[in-house]
C-alpha cells in the first residue's frame, strides 16, 4: 500500500504529515526549516521515494471568500517546482493536489492550547497544521 503526504508550505517552514499505509490516519513528521534546509525540494523528493508516497496533498491558503490571494499564488509556484522535481526522477506516478487549508492554523493553535503546548513552538504549529490538512482530506475520502 502507498501513503499520502501532506504539506503545509510556509515562507520559513514546511509542515509535513504522512498517512498510515491504509490511508486512515495522519501522523506528523518533522518540520523543514527552509533557512537550514536549502534544498528542501530534494528532501521532499527523497521522502516521497522512501515512504512510497503516491499522492501529495498541499494545503492551499484561501481568503474567507474562497479566492486565492498572494500566499496562495506562492503555494502554486511551490507546487510547480515540486512537480518538476518529482517528475525529474523516476519515482513513479505521484499525484499532487491542493486542499483548502482555511482556519487550520487557528485549529492548530486551539489544539496546542488544549494539549498545554507552548504556542511559541512554531514548528509544532506547522506540523499540526499539516496533520489537520491530511486528516481532513482522509476523512473526506472515507465519506465517498
Image (cartoon, rainbow, N blue to C red):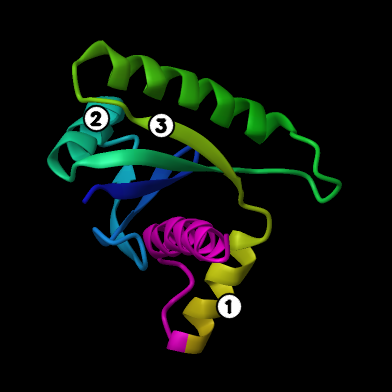
- Classify mark 2: residues with Cα within 10 Å, few (<14), some (14-19) or many (20+): some
Residue to which mark 3 is pinned? 95
Element under disc 1: helix
111 shown above or below 100: below
Label ID, residue 19: none
Distance (Cα) linking label 3 and label 2:
13 Å
Which of labels 3 and 2 is toward the front? Answer: 3
In this rendering, does residue 62 appear at all? yes
Distance (Cα) linking label 1 and label 3:
31 Å
Majority secondary structure of the magenta segment?
helix
140 shown above or below 77: below
Q: Quadrant of the C terminus?
A: bottom right
Badge 1 vs badge 2, beta-carbon distance below 8 Å:
no
Residue 44 in which image quadrant: top left
Badge 1 vs badge 3, beta-carbon distance below 8 Å:
no
Which of the two residues, 24 or 131, is positioned nearer the viewer here? 24
Say whether residue 119 is magenta: yes
Q: Which mark is first along the chain, 2 or 3? A: 2
Please state the total of marks drawn on the protein image.
3
Residue to which mark 1 is pinned? 110
Q: Which residues lie in the magenta part?
A: 115-144
Q: Which mark is first along the chain, 2 or 1? A: 2
Badge 3 vs badge 2, beta-carbon distance below 8 Å:
no
Judged from this view, the residue extending furthest toward the left is: 50
Element under disc 2: helix
Residue to which mark 2 is pinned? 45
Amino acid at each position: 500500500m502507498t501513503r499520502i503526504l501532506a504539506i503545509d508550505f510556509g515562507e520559513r517552514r514546511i509542515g509535513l504529515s504522512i498517512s498510515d499505509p491504509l490511508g486512515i490516519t495522519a501522523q506528523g513528521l518533522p518540520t523543514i526549516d527552509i533557512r537550514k534546509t536549502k534544498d528542501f525540494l530534494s528532501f521532499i523528493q527523497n521522502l516521497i521515494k522512501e515512504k512510497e508516497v503516491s499522492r501529495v496533498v498541499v494545503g492551499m491558503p484561501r481568503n474567507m471568500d474562497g479566492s486565492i490571494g498572494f500566499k496562495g499564488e506562492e503555494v502554486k509556484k511551490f507546487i510547480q517546482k515540486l512537480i518538476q522535481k518529482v517528475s525529474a526522477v523516476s519515482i513513479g506516478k505521484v499525484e499532487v493536489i491542493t486542499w483548502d487549508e482555511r482556519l487550520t492554523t487557528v485549529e492548530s493553535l486551539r489544539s496546542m492550547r488544549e494539549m498545554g503546548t507552548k504556542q511559541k513552538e512554531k514548528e509544532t504549529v506547522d506540523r499540526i497544521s499539516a496533520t489537520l490538512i491530511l486528516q481532513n482530506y482522509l476523512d473526506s475520502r472515507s465519506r465517498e
